[in-house]
Amino acid sequence: MEKAMISNVKLSLRSGNTVTDEVLLSSLSVLSPAGLRLYSIAGQDKVEEIFAKDNTEQIRIVERLFNSSLVVLVTSQKPNCLKMLHFKKKQDICNCFYPSEILCVRMNRQRLIVCLAESIHIHDIRDMKILHSIENIAPNELGLCALSLNSHLAFPVCQSSGELRIFNANKLRTGMTIKAHDTPLSALTFSPSGALLATASERGTVIRVFCVKNGQRVQEFRRGVSCVRIASLVFAASGDFLCASSNTETVHIFKIDARAVESVELKAIAEVAAKSDKASKESAASAPPETEEATATPVASWGGMFTKAVSSLLHSTQVSDVLAQDRSFATVVLAQAGLKHICALTRVQKELRLLIACEDGFLYVHEFNAERGGSCKLLAVHDLRGALEDVIELQLSESVLKMQAKPVTTPQSLTLLKSCAASVLIENPDPMPDNSYASILRGDQADAMSGEDSAKFRKLCDAIDTPTKLYDERQFPPVAIAAKD
């Protein structure tokens, strides 16, 4: 088979349902002119291909929901169509059509986000119903956005500066606006806990970390003095390191200062206490004389004492440390500059490892010392350009052709969801009987929803559900086991 340059690589590091679950398996998706391949990274010397698909439809975007069987695709032939499939069962789940070209897709276990140039659409990933659309945003030609595990969504709101907005995709509420940089943004990423947000501008010289609760700057890292294009910006699975790669030959790893994070959070609590103290004094001033003392004293004294206590912890030296520009804690010097590298820092077989996937078709595994930092030693190299044996092959185009051959006459097969100025069309494939053991246990849900919706719901749940505690690395996807005391 002819070796080809890889056009898109993505490392996924989380397999648990919550941010506290242990990271048991990492995955890698590789998109090349020859096709799409998914790999599982079970060990330093164990990278296994688990799925392969010929690139007959010119796939340009691929996203996998952590280590589940749910995969979404966007092709060059239909750039406004999102195709969702269960790759293990070789099933199409649904197709979603949007008013313009899809630039980016983000997913967690509650929400699916589709980013267009001037709008963002938020879906419930369990049934793909559209919950909200953010319309008339500043032109976002890069499709830049980030989604945290607790469904905080960050996206740029200005073309001329690095201003961004945080939106709560769970509660569907607009949050704060943060002016992160003077120049437009080029990278956004949340920490695994969702408490921190890291940003980089199109200059790529400075990387900043903000507290999501109050928008305060926690740390600022100096990557270099020359302008570069940031290719990858990602937190470690533990959240205490931040990794950045660019079009240069150096990969930088920065250390998150836990004390700086705590100081900013304490400052936010102090501000809330001060506002509460002020509000209580104003309400006490307007209260009748007989109730004034009883109303003002407890709240005011608590707010004042708490503000003073927290303020005493925030010395000027600590504040200067927070705003100081820190240098990289560890680095990797690559063999060649100018190529796109995607990085991830996670535990592989209980050892902390730096994974670097390059568009030249190779995966590099480096040692990382969390105590000393410094230069990271290369441990292993994996060639991802060729096909391996015994993999799952899926021709999605065949199922699409079959679906197009059938006349669409029943209104149940098409669902039109309107939102403000745009409309999203969700096309469900014809329902297929599910005779699996899980379906038998689940029972008939015909009373709750229609046949098409029920089939799609079961496929989605089956693709994204994973057990909360039990996990067998030898099975893919993992099988949930119900246990009773």
Image: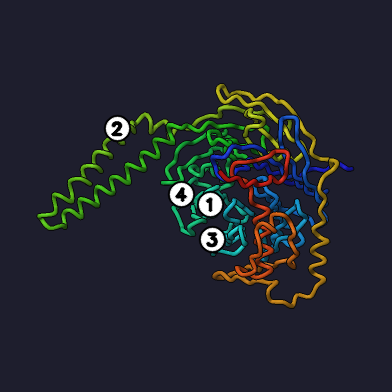
Q: Secondary structure at mark 4?
A: strand
Residue 144, image x and y in percent?
59, 51
Q: Which residue is mark 4?
A: 178
How far apart are the two marked residues, 4 and 2, measured between alpha carbons?
27 Å
How far apart are the two marked residues, 3 and 2, measured between alpha carbons?
42 Å
Among the 4 quarters of the image, the one containing residue 398: bottom right
Which of the two marks, 4 or 2, is nearer to us in this view?
Answer: 2
Specify few, some or many for label 1: CA neighbours under 10 Å numbering under 14, 14-19, or 20 or more: many
Q: Which residue is mark 2?
A: 312
Q: Which residue is mark 1?
A: 151
Q: Which residue is mark 3?
A: 137
Residue type pointed to by label 3: Ile
Which of the two marks, 4 or 1, is nearer to us in this view?
Answer: 1
Residue 223, image x and y in percent?
57, 34
Residue type pointed to by label 1: Ser
How far apart are the two marked residues, 4 and 1, measured between alpha carbons?
18 Å
Q: Secondary structure at mark 2?
A: helix
Nearest to the observer: residue 23 or residue 480? 480
Which of the two marks, 3 or 2, is nearer to us in this view?
Answer: 2
